[in-house]
Image (cartoon, rainbow, N blue to C red):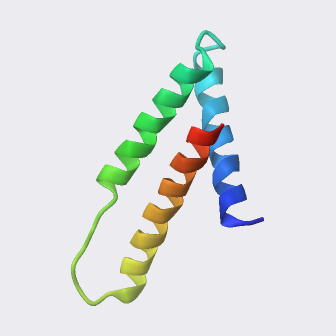
Amino acid sequence: MTPREEARNKAKELLKKVDDCVCGDINERNAKDMVLLIIDEILQTNPTIKGNSDDFITMIVQTKAYWHLVKEELETL
């Protein structure tokens, strides 16, 4: 599975969880808006560090890139 496909699956999974949580009493646009808020919060609170720990920095960059990709895929659904 490509990273884009994984991101699209995560976006769909999050939409389903929001829909399940509110028992289907929400339209798709509102569900997307809720998931976008969650992703933005993840991106804002993901730590950024300065230092020489290449492995940790790489993990942070990869995590942020993943959530940006999920956000892009969510917006195309």
Residue 55 placement, left or right of 17: left
- The structure residue drawn at horizontal position 48% and vertical position 55%, both measured from the top left corner, is 68
Q: Where is residue 62 in the image (x, y as percent from the top left)?
A: 48, 70
**Residue projecting furthest to the left:** 50
Front position in the image: 61 or 47: 61
Name the residue at the right extreme. 1
Relative to 40, is 19 above or below? Answer: above
- What residue do we see at 50% from left, 34% from top? 35
Residue at 58 percent across and 27 percent down: it is 18
Residue 30: x and y in percent read 52, 20
Quadrant showing the C terminus: top right
Quarter occupied by residue 52: bottom left
Quarter-of-image position of residue 32: top right
Up/down of 34 relative to 58, above or below? above
- The one nearer the camera, 39 or 17, is 39
Relative to 20, does residue 1 appear above or below in the rendering?
Answer: below
